[in-house]
Amino acid sequence: MAQDKLTARMRLNKFLAQAGVSSRRGADLLIQSGRVTINGVAIKKLGISIDEKNDEIRVDGKKVSLPEKFIYLLLNKPKGYLCTVKDSFGRPTVLDLVGKDKKVFPVGRLDLDAEGVLLLTNRGELAYRLTHPKFQVEKTYIVTVKGEINEKILKKFHKGIKLEDGNIAKGEGRILKIERDHSVFELRLREGRKREIKRMCKAVGFSVTNLVRTRFANLTAKNLKRGGWRHLKEKEVKSLKKMIGL
């Protein structure tokens, strides 16, 4: 106990997240699979604390350390780019747009055929909190679907749509435009399940033809052309941290 007071202790999964290796959940999977070593010893037990300054942590043999400086980038993602750091098939990723030298990763995801606001950072804890359902961070989308949507459907979204995996997805909708062959509406969500909007629409008989995220937390892509990016302003970072209690 006395030694713990003299050294900086941190949960291993939190350390891996802060180092930008993965989310906390992903870090737990890495640990359980035996891919993480502490001072040369492979461990599989969860809940272990480390001395972040003196212990040597490696993942798949590669040394991991905390970044000297946190980076926060805002990208107006175009279609055709994957929200991942690296693709095994060589397809374009969002890092091709911001520069692979930035050593950041996307917070959450937008599908290959979706576009709009995307945050990238090397701060794992911030990414974890912004994407975890318990923090209820709001995201806003403009959705285009085939056919004529109506208020009755949007009320179903508000009440909750049961997805094919049994999860309930909810969102606040607002109709923007209705044409004979398609409809456009705004949808605000506070969770971020994989392909959630497309699955919600499919559950009520609609197929999504276009999807744009216009807001993520307090961030918008205002004045950013498609494919353009910028560093977050200090006040934007402070606002994000306050929102998630960081």
Image (spheres, rainbow, N blue to C red):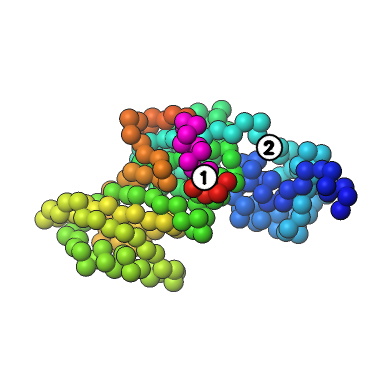
Give coordinates of residue 69: x percent, y percent: 62, 31
Residue 191 visible, this angle: yes
Give coordinates of residue 20: x percent, y percent: 61, 41
Q: Tell me which segment is drawn in magenta.
A: 232-241
Verify whether residue 76 appears in magenta. no
Comparing 13 with 195, the one in front is 13
Identify the main secondary structure in magenta.
helix
Three-letter amino acid code of the residue under disc 1: Lys
Mark number, residue 242: 1
Please tell me which of labels 2 and 1 falls first in the chain.
2
Q: Does the CB distance between marks 2 and 1 fall below 8 Å?
A: no
Mark number, residue 66: 2
Comparing 99 with 134, the one in front is 134
Give coordinates of residue 179: x percent, y percent: 13, 53
With respect to residue 116, does 185 lie above or below?
Answer: below
Three-letter amino acid code of the residue under disc 2: Leu
With respect to residue 229, does 212 lie above or below?
Answer: below
